[in-house]
Image: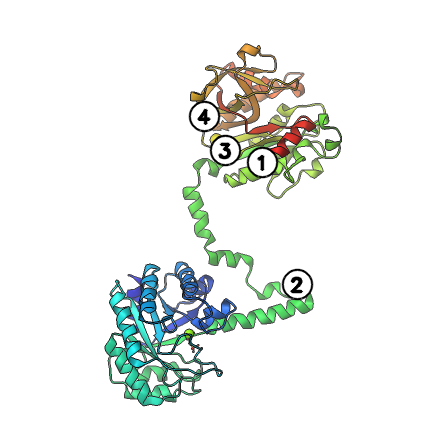
Amino acid sequence: MRKSTLLRKMITSPELEFLMEAHSGISAKIVEEAGFKGIWASSLSISASLGLRDNNEASWTQVVDVAEYMNDATTLPILLDGDTGYGNFNNARRLVRKLESRNIAGVCIEDKVFPKTNSLASRGKQPLADISEFCGKIRAMKDTQVDPDFVVVARVEAFIAGWGLEEALARADEYRNAGADAILIHSKKSSAVEIEQFMKAWKNPTPVIVIPTKYYSTPPEKLASLGVSTVIWANHNLRASITAMQRLSRQLHDEQYLINIEDTIVPVGEVFRLQGDAELEAAEQAYLPVAGKTINAIILAASQGKTLGILTAHIPKALLKIGGKPILFHQIDHFTQMGIKDIVVVRGFAKENVVSDKIRTIDNDDFRNTTELLSLYLAKDEIRESSIISYGDLFYKSYILNELVNDDSDITIIADADYSRDSGYHEYVKTSIPYSKKLFFKNVSLSQIGPDLEPGEICGEFIGIFKLSRRGGDIVRETLEVMHDRKNFGRLRMKDLFMEILRKHPICVKFIKGNWLDINTIADLQRMDEI
Ligand code: SPV
Ligand code: MG
């Protein structure tokens, strides 16, 4: 059922119905969870929660924006307190169009003059609108609405302005004739005397709504017996939250300690629940890349990086900073942004510095005598359904990771066709087809890998990141077990693993061109900062 239809049913039902005030998305949600059937988007509460006065200080578009947040947060229909309609008939009908487009169920306008003053304020006059001008406004609003159930409530302020019963009745009757779906008769007396007079004299079928803020001791049964259709609790969530916030702020200011506070307020988890976190979690399951759900990452970050001298005297090279952030944490951020939250780091040198609540760790305490292959061996049981293995000193653009995540070969390594020929250690690759632009991001298979390839054979350079499917993981684990028996295992490199695998299984190569660096020298580090 449309929200407008729900609201219309409420105000025309023979039962006494209640609209509860809300002024924000979260308060709208709270009202719904309490069991109410409809919401009053109060101008007093909305303006106050914005830190403004209820004198049209908030622009009408700002009010409509708040109403939209409220509407998004609840399935309940909202009756917006539209003050005077924010101008003449033209402004009021434009308001109707905007409210309809944002699925607000109805609007109440009051017969005062823009800018209006809150009806309960002791300060300020309450000049009333000209009756015929206000009737024109109602007609314009009714003529504009597209949804026949959109509700227009006409609010009579004759009692508020001190004009008495006769004026109130005359106005209500005119507004009914102009097409109002309901009359809101307002009073600021501390008893319901004016409401009682009005209801006894009101012989029309048009429903009547009241706001008993000031005559709060009047029981709802009394209002029901007078024939009132709907009661608005107009500002009580706002006032309750002010009471709570004042009490808490004072206490925390005085005590400067949370110990006595924590149990008196909702846990943060309740905030998350009200924000609809569970829905987002379910949506993530449904919509994030499939690989992201089961993929995990293993970062090999045990080595010190001696060639970097003083820079790595106390931290491993994976913790060198680029743009103020350690390289390792650039990687961790790339992974988490891809939805890969299961991250294991194999640490070794200065391992006490490699800590984060985003990672688990495995220690390669023999890091001085071993290479990245032994680190991988230590982490082999972490290779699961789909795993990305990466060197810890690798700095790369995140699209490279994206390409790997979406690759479904069993073993895929990334190679840079724009390879370096400096004197450092590089694992060059020879592939089934040499790199060409047409190949960009297509897979080819690895024929050979190592530092000693003939220049004419080199197609690219392994950059230190690869992905394994479940089957690829099994192959790597089995191969590592076989190789582990060799005496010099601790000195073998990743290329030895790949060459061993190639004896029985293919390895895919994805080519990139640049957009990454590893760090072996201070010059590398400077280049990274330039990037
Ligand atoms: C509101 O809630 O903003 C109202 C009711 O308009 S009253 O504050 O009584 O004017
Ligand atoms: Mg108001």
Q: Picture coordinates of residue 369 (x, y %)?
A: 71, 23
- Look at the picture and state if 389 lies above or below 45: above
The first of marks 1 and 4 along the sequence is 1
Query: Do callouts 1 and 2 mark residues in contact (Cβ within 8 Å)?
Result: no
Specify whether 172 is left or right of 464: left
Work out whether residue 12 can be spotted: no
Residue indicated by mark 2: 259
Name the quadrant where ligand 2 sits: bottom left
- Graded by Cα atoms within 10 Å as few (under 14), some (14 to 19) or many (20 or more), the crowding at tag 1 reads many
Q: Which mark is residue 441?
A: 4
Q: CA distance from mark 3 to mark 1?
A: 12 Å
- Determine the secondary structure under disc 3: helix
Dot in front, 1 or 2: 1
Residue indicated by mark 3: 399
- Determine the secondary structure under disc 2: loop
Which residue is depicted at the point 31% across and 89% down?
166
Residue indicated by mark 1: 331
